[in-house]
Amino acid sequence: MNLNYTAEELAFRDEVRAFLDEKLPADIAAKVKGFRRLSKEDHQRWQKILNEQGWYATHWPEEYGGVNWSPVQKHIWDEESSRYGAPRSVPFGVNMVAPVIIKFGTEEQKQRYLPRILSGEDWWCQGYSEPGAGSDLASLKTRAVRDGDHYIVNGQKTWTTLGQHANMIFCLVRTNTEVKAQEGISFLLIDMDTPGITVRPIITLDGEHEVNEVFFEDVKVPVENLVGEEDKGWTYAKYLLTYERTGLAGIGISKAALQHLKELATRRIKNGRPLIEDASFSQRIARVEIDLMAAGISNLRIIASVEGGGMPGAESSMLKVRGTEIRQTINDLARRALGPYAIPFVEEEMDLDYDGDFLSDENAAPVTPQYFNNRKLSIFGGSNEIQKNIVSKMILGL
């Protein structure tokens, strides 16, 4: 593995930087760098800019409107866009359901859904988790019963991220109860405007409406919205989760968060000196920075494997575990840097246009909400305990 960029890759990095300098809206970048709220309109505005550039669907084949980037180019894009403060693409359409449709969907499904994902006409959410089926996803209870040319869907999904914005949801549903749990699941594409669907908000500790419950009551879904074969949805779900877990490593995001931590620790004063000069605290920052560098090298190693024709497998679980632990550690250090100022919280400070008095540092408002919100990182996408089991079995052979 060669860890040095080629001349062509360095030229591509320059092109990415020039694009971000020119096209990334300053107000959106300020929100991202300050960990402030991003609206649906912010995401749509940035998606439109990327799509006009032809850089939105970096994981898709060119024939469907994707970008013929190498894994290294994708890595460069992730690193630079995080450094500049570009929003991460909402993954459920472009990075999650789209690869499944491209690999397993019918030609009609590709022609219908892929252009609408590119244009932003469809906003997708994910219907996997249920109240009794999280990491043990195969125990899901939502049923889909065939009735002529439709499936009748009944059940509940939960923790549905940004479902309040979505007009489409991809769901795992049980279509067969007479076989092993994993063998009776199907993958359905469902229009959120179909009668019988109810979305209820779950308001999190920081006052945010990020996640939802989704209820299905006698929802009629056309059979043509089945992806692949009936009862084979577990195969497609695992394929999707491989892409999701690799993305959860968040190396670029962690680097941006580490820079934010260092800036915060430079402004906080302890015993008359900047906190970042405190021996104990600086050692903690150094430790997480070393861990992040090691995770970055592992990420590059896996990228090199993929570029050679491979596909991320159990290594994606390893990246998910280490990447989420690193992000949580950075969140914890930022909270510790604030000390007692991490306790009070004024929700309005999360808005970029807030013009009142700040309780402490103007960049401190998002720190505690980020700390609590990112406790979920080691749970969703398959809990870290489950990922460690996968690594021990598939890589260590235990």
Image (spheres, rainbow, N blue to C red):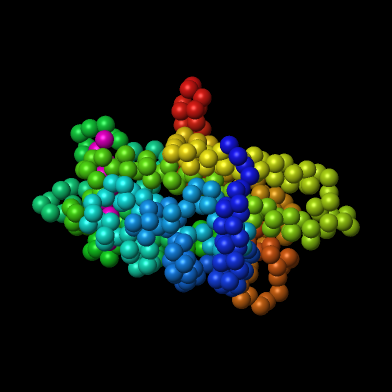
At which x and y percent is residue 252?
Answer: 59, 52
Q: Does residue 259 appear in this view?
A: yes
Give the magenta part as a residue range: 183-191
Up-down: is 36 above or below 254? below
Between 120 and 359, the residue placed more toward the observer is: 120
Query: Seen from this angle, which residue lies furthest front?
Result: 7
| Magenta-drawn stretch, dominant element (helix, strand or loop) | strand
User: What residue do we see at 26% from left, 31% from top?
Assistant: 180
- For the point 37% across and 40% down, the residue is 238
Question: Which residue is at a point 68% across and 76% down the rendered structure image?
Answer: 356
Q: Residue at x 16, y 54 (%)?
A: 150
Say if the magenta span includes residue 93: no
Q: Is residue 371 above or below residue 182?
A: below
Residue 186 belongs to magenta span: yes
In this rendering, position of residue 342 left or right of residue 102: right
Residue 127 visible here: no
Residue 299, position in %: x, y?
56, 42
- Image-quadrant location for residue 86: bottom right
330 sits to left or right of 178:
right
Q: Nearer the viewer, residue 20 or 154?
A: 20
Comparing 339 with 71, the one in front is 71
| Above-or-below relation of 125 to 104 | below
Q: Quadrant of the N terminus?
A: top right
Residue 181 position, x and y percent, is: 29, 35
Q: For this view, does 208 lie left or right of residue 233?
A: right
